Amino acid sequence: MLTVFARLAWAHDWNTAREATATFQTLPGATFVVYTAQPSANAALASVGVEMK
């Protein structure tokens, strides 16, 4: 039995801000902000395959 399949997915991220605020619990007042790489607001994933059982 031969099965052919295809998948397509799309994602849209409304909030692309990539910052996180961190605080040490044992050291009050030592708050800092971490900025990461900003990804694209839109992303797509496509795959095609064949399966033989």
Image (cartoon, rainbow, N blue to C red):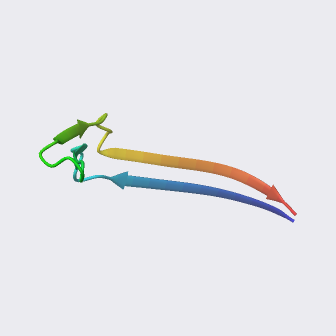
* Quadrant of the image occupied by residue 18: top left
Residue 25 in the image, given as x and y percentages of width and height = 24, 53
Q: Decide which of 18, 8 is in the foreground and name it.
A: 18
Q: Decide which of 16, 19 is in the foreground and name it.
A: 19
What residue appears at the point 24 percent right and 36 percent down from the top-left corner? 35
Q: Is residue 3 above or below residue 13?
A: below
Outermost residue, left side: 29
* Quadrant of the image occupied by residue 41: top left
Q: Decide which of 27, 1 is in the foreground and name it.
A: 27
Q: Is residue 15 above or below residue 34?
A: below
What residue appears at the point 19 percent right and 40 percent down from the top-left corner? 33
Q: Decide which of 53, 36 is in the foreground and name it.
A: 36
Is residue 31 found left or right of 51 in the rendered image?
left
Residue 51 in the image, given as x and y percentages of width and height = 79, 57
Q: Quadrant of the C terminus?
A: bottom right
Q: Quadrant of the N terminus?
A: bottom right
Q: Is residue 52 above or below residue 37?
A: below
Residue 11 in the image, given as x and y percentages of width and height = 37, 54
Is residue 29 found left or right of 10 in the rendered image?
left
What residue appears at the point 16 percent right and 42 percent down from the top-left corner? 30
Label total for image: 0
